[in-house]
Amino acid sequence: QKEVEQDPGPLSVPEGAIVSLNCTYSNSAFQYFMWYRQYSRKGPELLMYTYSSGNKEDGRFTAQVDKSSKYISLFIRDSQPSDSATYLCAMSSGSARQLTFGSGTQLTVLP
Amino acid sequence: GAVVSQHPSWVICKSGTSVKIECRSLDFQATTMFWYRQFPKQSLMLMATSNEGSKATYEQGVEKDKFLINHASLTLSTLTVTSAHPEDSSFYICSAFPGTSGSSVEFFGPGTRLTVL
């Protein structure tokens, strides 16, 4: 079993839809949780960063962390074609520098 | 925000030659940098961890004599692919960790696409 599981998709939604992207993990030591967006042939771009459990909102993006369930989510409201990309979840314990990534979910928002 | 650059953005070389890729943190000092490799439609694969002033730590299965990493300063790490072969063709991405941050956030470069003919 991988430490971090992420549905690879692909996921296609119509413009304006609410998108839910999820990751589950097995390592209870993880405390730092990140979502990265990667456009084709580009490096990953940090979207959201959360420490421990809770919600964090930034514009159309909301990140949720439920440590009791070992489950994190990224919600995208009013999705746009420009949101079409691969979304990677990542997490770490803090003591170990290395991030553990999910496999990425490919999202396409159709105009 | 934290900016990481990579140079070159793409390179084509002949089989048997060596290629050097630079990774720079532009507005912060990075005590740790990471090198990843990514094949089409696949996730990032960590190759090695580069710490300033010390030898790089390579992941299992990554040939350290083939992928030479040098982290000569707090803002620069280089990856040299020696005696490149077509199977080394891939997308190489570096990331940098601001050492003073307690957040564990990595900031990624834009990537370098290597094609070996």
Image (cartoon, coloured by chain):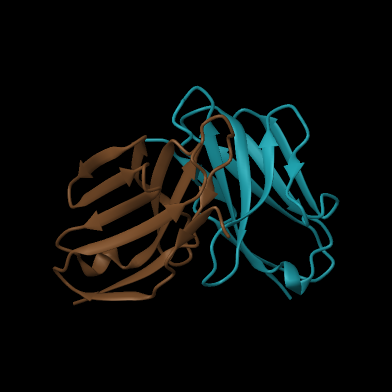
Chain colours: A brown, B cyan
Q: Look at the image and tell me in which quarter the C terminus of chain B lies.
A: bottom right
Can see residue B3?
Answer: yes
Outermost residue to the front:
A68
In the image, is B97 to the left or to the right of B83?
A: left
**Residue at 61%, 53% in the rendered image:** B36
In the image, is A32 to the left or to the right of B76?
A: left
Q: Nearer the viewer, residue A16 or B52?
A: A16
**Residue at 36%, 65% in the rendered image:** A85
Q: Nearer the viewer, residue A55 or A99?
A: A55
Q: Look at the image and tell me in which quarter the N terminus of chain B lies.
A: top left
Count of numbered marks: 0
Image height of B114 relative to A67, above or below: below
Can see residue B114?
Answer: no
**Residue at 47%, 44% in the rendered image:** A91
Outermost residue to the top:
B100
Image height of B59 relative to A1, above or below: above
Q: Position of residue A34 (x, y in %)?
A: 40, 45
Q: Nearer the viewer, residue A83 or A77?
A: A77
Q: Position of residue B110 (x, y in %)?
A: 49, 53
**Residue at 78%, 34% in the rendered image:** B55
Q: Position of residue A104 (x, y in %)?
A: 45, 62
Q: Nearer the viewer, residue B4 or B7?
A: B4
In the image, is B79 to the left or to the right of A92?
A: right
Image height of A32 relative to A20, above or below: above
Q: Position of residue B39 (x, y in %)?
A: 60, 68
